[in-house]
Image (cartoon, rainbow, N blue to C red):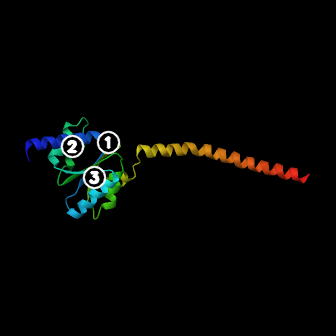
C-alpha cells in the first residue's frame, strides 16, 4: 500500500473516531466471507458503520485523535473490525445476535464515555441505555404520579356523582 493511501485511510479513520460517540473493536479472524457479508448487512440495517482496518493504521488514527484512546492499543492484534455507532448498545446487540461460538468476538468498546476491554463486558454493553432511553424513562417516572392523581380524582368524581344521583332518585 502506498504511503499516500495510508495517509488517506488514517485521515478517514480519524474523522470517524471524532464523528461517532461509540466505537467497538471486534475480532473477525475466524469469519468466512458469508458470515462477514451477513454481519455487514446487519450493521447497515442497524445504522452501524463497519470497517475492517489494519491495526497499525487504526493506532495512528487513535494517536491523531484529540481524545486519548491508549487503552485500545493492547487490543490491536489479529484481524480487527471497527464498528462506529450513534447508539451505545446497537453494536453490542449485533455482536450478541450474530455471534456463533464467540465469532465475532468483542475485543474492546468505547461507549457512553467509558472503555470496556474484553469480551466479558458484552452483556453490560447490551444493557446500556442510550441518553434518549434514559430521558424517556425519567419522563415516564415523573408522569406516573400525576397520572395516578388524575385517575384517582376522576374515579372519585364518578363515585360521588353516582352516589348523588342515587340519593336524588330515592326521594
Q: Nearer the viewer, mark 2 or mark 3?
A: 2
Q: Is residue 41 shown above or below 75?
A: below
Mark nearer the N terminus (2 vs 3): 2
Task: Report x, y in % for residue 90.
Answer: 35, 52
Q: Are marks 2 and 1 in contact (CB under 8 Å)?
A: no
Residue 84: x and y in percent read 28, 47
Q: Which residue is denoted by mark 3 in the rendering?
A: 118
Residue 103 in sight here: no
For label 1, count other residues whose C-alpha is less than 10 Å away and answer few (under 14), some (14-19) or many (20+).
some
Name the residue tied to disc 1. Answer: 21
Q: Measuring from the top left, give residue 151's x and y in whole percent.
A: 66, 48
Mark 2 to mark 3 CA distance (whole Å): 22 Å
Q: Nearer the viewer, mark 3 or mark 1?
A: 1
Q: Which residue is drawn at 20% across and 42% down?
A: 12
What is the CA distance from the residue labelled 3 to the residue labelled 1? 19 Å
Q: In which quarter of the image is residue 22?
A: top left
Find disc 2 in the rendering and name its residue.
Answer: 13
Q: What element carries label 3?
A: loop
Circle 3 packing at 10 Å, graded few (<14), some (14-19), many (20+), is some
Residue 98 visible at all: yes
Q: How far apart are marks 2 and 1 (CA)?
A: 13 Å
Asked if marks 3 and 1 touch (Cβ < 8 Å), the reply is: no
Upstream in sequence: badge 3 or badge 1: 1
Amino acid at each position: 500500500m502506498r504511503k499516500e493511501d495510508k495517509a488517506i485511510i488514517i485521515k478517514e479513520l480519524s474523522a470517524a473516531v471524532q464523528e461517532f460517540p461509540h466505537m467497538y473493536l471486534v475480532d473477525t479472524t475466524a469469519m468466512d466471507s458469508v458470515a462477514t457479508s451477513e454481519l455487514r448487512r446487519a450493521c447497515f440495517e442497524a445504522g452501524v458503520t463497519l470497517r475492517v482496518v489494519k491495526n497499525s493504521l487504526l493506532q495512528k488514527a487513535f494517536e491523531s485523535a484529540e481524545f486519548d484512546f491508549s487503552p485500545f492499543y493492547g487490543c490491536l492484534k489479529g484481524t480487527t473490525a471497527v464498528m462506529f455507532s450513534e447508539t451505545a448498545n446497537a453494536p453490542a446487540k449485533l455482536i450478541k445476535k450474530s455471534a456463533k461460538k464467540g465469532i465475532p468476538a468483542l475485543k474492546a468498546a468505547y461507549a457512553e464515555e467509558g472503555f470496556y476491554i474484553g469480551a466479558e463486558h458484552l452483556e453490560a454493553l447490551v444493557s446500556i441505555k442510550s441518553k434518549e432511553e434514559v430521558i424517556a424513562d425519567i419522563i415516564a417516572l415523573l408522569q406516573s404520579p400525576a397520572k395516578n392523581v388524575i385517575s384517582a380524582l376522576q374515579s372519585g368524581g364518578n363515585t360521588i356523582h353516582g352516589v348523588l344521583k342515587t340519593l336524588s332518585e330515592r326521594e
